[in-house]
Image (cartoon, coloured by chain):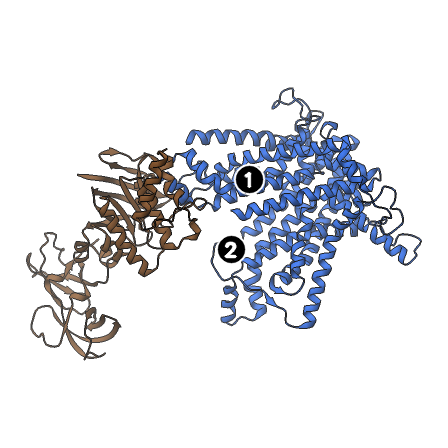
Chain colours: A blue, B brown
Amino acid sequence: MKTNRVFLLLIALVVLAYGVIYPNAAVVASSFQRAGAWTLANYTEILAQRIVLESIVSSLGLSIATVLLCALVGVPLAFLFERYTFPGRRLFAAVAALPLVLPPLVGTVAFIFLCGESGILAHGVQNLFRLQNPPWRLSGWPALLLFHTYTMYPFFYVLTGAGLRRIDASLAEAARSLGGSRAFVFLRVLAPQLTPSLIAAALLTFMTSMASFSAPLLFGGNVRVLTLEIFQARQRGDLTMAVTETVILAVISLAALVVFQRYEGTRKFAAATMKGAPRRRVTIASGTARALAATAAIAFAIVLVLPVATLFLVSFAREGSWTTQALPAAYTFANYQRLFSDAYAAEVFFNSFSMSAIAAVAALAWSFCVVTLLLKRARGNATFLGRGGRRLLSLLILIPWALPGTVVAVSVAEAYGQPSWLLGSFVLVGTFWILPVIYFLRFMPLVVRALQASMEQLDPSLGEAAGSLGARAWQRFARVTLPLVWPGAVAGTLLAFVIALGEYVASVLVFVPANRPISIAIASELRDFNLGAAAAYGVVLIVIISISMVIAGKLERLR
Amino acid sequence: MALLSLQNISRNFGTTRAVADVSLDVAQGEFFGLLGPSGCGKTTTLRMIAGLEQPDSGSIHFQDKDITSLPPERRGFGMVFQNYALFPHLNVFENVAFGLRARHAPKTEISDRVRSALELVQLPGYEKRAIDELSGGQQQRVAIARAIAIEPVLLLFDEPLSNLDVSLREETRGELRELVTRLGLTAVYVTHDQEEAFALCDRISVMVGGRLMQSGEPRELYEEPSDIAVARFLGRNNLIRVMRLSSSKTSDGEFKTLDGGHVLHVSVAREDLAPLNKPVVLAIRPEHVRLSQNNEGAPNVLHGTIREIVFAGATSTIRVDANGLLLETLVVQPDGLRVNQECTVMLPADRLRLLNHG
């Protein structure tokens, strides 16, 4: 028993040392070094540049504005759709989380086709009013904020909705019976209980926005954000600048994490296990209100589906047939035929599939290894690691997920870009393996969390019962634990797999011809104005993701 | 000779002392109860017997072998959990067969033993059922069948009936006792329900605050609780704070009540007479307090006033205030009694128990 744990801990420490501690330390160290000597010069020089300061301010401003806008959209929608029932409610609920499953690059491309200056909407308006020029350009702050709100509002919508569902209706009823007015009850009972959901949503939105790369790259205009600056510095070959900016981005992201979590820690919230009556949805009685709500539901549903529909439409457009018309003039299967016959496309798909599969399977195996160490034992039984040890371990595991993909890619590249004392003469950068490694690091926290949740839900007395019936440790694992936790674990693994499949942010920094993934192909088709081909790649990705999500959802329900 | 023997076992959770220096013996064929309020350490004690928990100090012997650090799967004890802990992904047959499969029993033996275990708990024909298709009572039976299918040398029960409703609980209780007796098993049964423990167990240990307070047959515990905690926990008791008088003799103790100043005579057979001029506690069951109107002059007769009459079906509880000393008595026929009526109560000298102090 104990020797097994020691072995698992050893694996965990080695993986974390190579994957998390050393790369991040290497980046920090080299940001403080110049020609082998320790110095603050990199920071003083870089922070003196207007352009760098501007990008820090822009990144922060964009993220804060995104959080506010997403809250403004997501929270009222959650209240409307969670509290009331009216025609069209289910239609919206079905597509509400759609933007979450779009890979950022695919979403960006779809947005360009729909809202760009030569997209469907702009051309439609231009043709309708016979304007000389496109009525708008999709660029700069408004474009970024619009896109961010579209892709990230579901954090607020989904988490607020879940929070509202969790609130025990009898608490509000008790507060009312004690004489509280509706407003008083909302402020004193409902709002405090929603706070954890809102904080979690704000944190996710902020971090995602800080890490956003595709949108600033493709239609950021003159808005300079840190992720983009790092990318461009690397493109220019200014590695010192890239590394120093990476540290700045990492520090901001981690600081946000700490601030949000500290705020959450200062308040006491209801135990999640509390039993109670769920709140029932109220039917909207007034005719006008019903009509308004229904219209809103349908309108929002259309808005959500439109970018994906556009992508779908453009994927069938004959190349060169879509110039000034609102909609493409000629349709064809040629884009898909090319996708399924072209050797280059086949290679790209093979690369993404194999790298994502390697990363996901490794993440699954890794999860079983670390969750055993992370698990609290029932009834205060001694754990192998103390409380502090468990917290440190889960923090180290969480770091690659909390850091922007740009940071992870730059730090791995920095650490393993030359012979190192950890890998000897082996240089990871420039090989096929750099991307599977980065995918693994970035997405393994998802699998760990999924497995941990499944394991924690497992009634500890089941294992004890098996033990009292004579089952040895491996029998308990194979016959009780595994059959009960695999659906959750596989669902988490699938999620990691599909996210890796569409990964762009980190891939673009370190890919090589030998491991060119789908996202790089999409970007290069877009650059060559092969819009149909770019869209077709996107549609195939969305289809694969949708199928995987359906399977994952079914598995989740199996638990 | 004891089949199972716990010697001075202790267990701490952080700074809390869950089990403190507990020693007990369970004889072959005995139905042994561990009784106490929630949080008293009885479940932890049971889990240490099962091997699910390790004592910080002390030892556990079974058939004279030290099993203190033997893992649960090598003890061969069957255990029935409070929440049953049935495997949700396995059907009834597979649940009951689980322990046999872990032992790699032959196929025919497995099916035979599962069938007979299910017959014993009166669930024949339920083999293919899923666990969530069963009622609470049926799940409970499956849990018992699973534990007895491995033919355990000792059967452990952790409040197995607490999730059943009252009528089903009493019915299952009878069946359980009958089953254990028929199979000639030895059982350790944890419960916080005094009535359940009295009905089931041959012998009971009462635990309070991690300590084992008193062990004995149910009647012995009820009639002669050794100290206040046990007297309080086991049913209702009038606890009377008294001081031993200097006129007190070994065969006839004389005590003065702190409330009311009455003099009570107690036939104290025990050697450990209370020290003089130090408060001690006497206990008497409400059903032993006699209520009457004409008992003048007899010893231990107190005058008082009826303060309250609580009707509770077969009996009624009468609360009497005897000059500041509040006493409860049970009567079958409360006819003719009314609140504020004058009365006398008699406390029979042989029914008053002197409790351990400290």
Give the label, 2 or 1, closer to the camera.
Answer: 1
* In this picture, residue A63 sits left or right of residue A488: right
Let me know if residue A27 appears in the view.
no
The amino acid at mark 2 is: Lys
* In this picture, residue A160 sits left or right of residue B318: right
Residue designated by label 2: A268
Instruction: Give how far across and how far down residue A223 sits, in percent.
Output: 79, 46
Instruction: Give how far across and how far down residue B184 sits, in percent.
Output: 22, 44
Nearest the viewer among B149 and B257 is: B149
The amino acid at mark 1 is: Val
The vertical placement of B139 against B25, above or below, is below
Q: Quadrant of the N terminus of chain A?
A: top left
- To which chain does the residue with label 1 belong? A
| Quarter of the view holding residue A227 | top right
Let me know if residue A313 appears in the view.
yes
Report the residue that reaches farthest toward the top: A425
Badge 1 marks a residue whose secondary structure is helix
Residue designated by label 1: A448
Mark 2 surroundings within 10 Å by alpha-carbon count, few (fewer than 14), some (14 through 19), many (20 or more): few
Q: Earlier in the sequence, mark 2 or mark 1?
A: 2
The vertical placement of A414 against B47, above or below, is above
Mark 2–mark 1 CB contact (< 8 Å): no
